[in-house]
Image (cartoon, grey):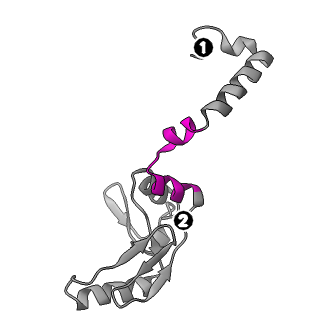
Amino acid sequence: MLASDFPISQGDSLWKKSENPFKLGGIFFNNAFRNGVLPVELPIEQVRVIVGEVEASSGYEPVTVDLENETVTAPKGQVFSFRTPPLLRAMLVEGMDEIELTLRHGADIEVFRKADGAKRPWAYRPGLAG
C-alpha cells in the first residue's frame, strides 16, 4: 500500500511522484501487477489513518486488503476503497500472466491465423511463422 506521494527510485536518486515523470499509475503500477504484487494507491490521509492504527497496536492489529471488492480495512474497521484495472485484477485473482491470458484465446488465434494465411500466404512461408 502506497501513499500518492510515494517516492519512486530513479537510478541513484529518489524522486517524489509529483516531481517524477514516472507516475505510480505507470511503470511501477504495471510492473507490480505483472510481478504478482497488488499496488494499492490511497490518499495520504487514509494511509496516515491506517499507519496510525497499526502503530498504536504495535503492529498486532491486521490491515485487510480485499482485491475482489477493492477495499482496505484498517485495524479499527474503517474501510477505504481503491481501484484496479479489471483485466489486471482478474489476472491477479486467477494467478495468470500475459502468456496464460494469450493461450486462453488459442482457438481464436488459430482462426485468425488461418484467415490471415489465406489473405497473406507469403507471411506464413515455412521458417517465418512456426
Marks 1 and 2 sit apart, C-alpha to C-alpha, by 38 Å
Which numbered disc covers residue 114? none
**SS category of the residue bearing label 2:** loop
Q: Which residue is drawn at the image coordinates 35% and 54% (left, top)? A: 11
Q: Quadrant of residue 102?
A: top right
Residue 61 x %, y %: 26, 84
Residue 50 x %, y %: 36, 85
Residue 120 x %, y %: 76, 17
Q: Dominant secondary structure of the magenta stretch? A: helix
Q: Quadrant of residue 74?
A: bottom left
Q: Quadrant of residue 124?
A: top right
* Label 1 vs 2, first from the N-terminus: 2
Q: 53 or 64, which lies in front? A: 64
Amino acid, disc 2: Thr
The residue where tag 1 is placed is 128
- Quadrant (top left, top right, bottom left, bottom right) of the C terminus: top right
Q: Disc 1 or disc 2, which is closer to the eye? A: 2
Q: Which residue is drawn at the image coordinates 72% and 11% (left, top)? A: 122
**Magenta residues, start to end:** 87-104
Q: 99 or 31, which lies in front? A: 99
The residue where tag 2 is placed is 84
Q: Is residue 67 magenta?
A: no
Residue 69 x %, y %: 52, 72
Callout 1 crowding tier (Cα within 10 Å): few <14, some 14–19, many ≥20 = few
Q: Are marks 1 and 2 in contact (CB under 8 Å)?
A: no
Q: Is residue 64 left or right of residue 116?
A: left
Q: Which residue is drawn at the image coordinates 78% and 16% (left, top)? A: 118
- Quadrant (top left, top right, bottom left, bottom right) of the N terminus: bottom left
The residue lying furthest to the top in this view is 126
Amino acid, disc 1: Leu
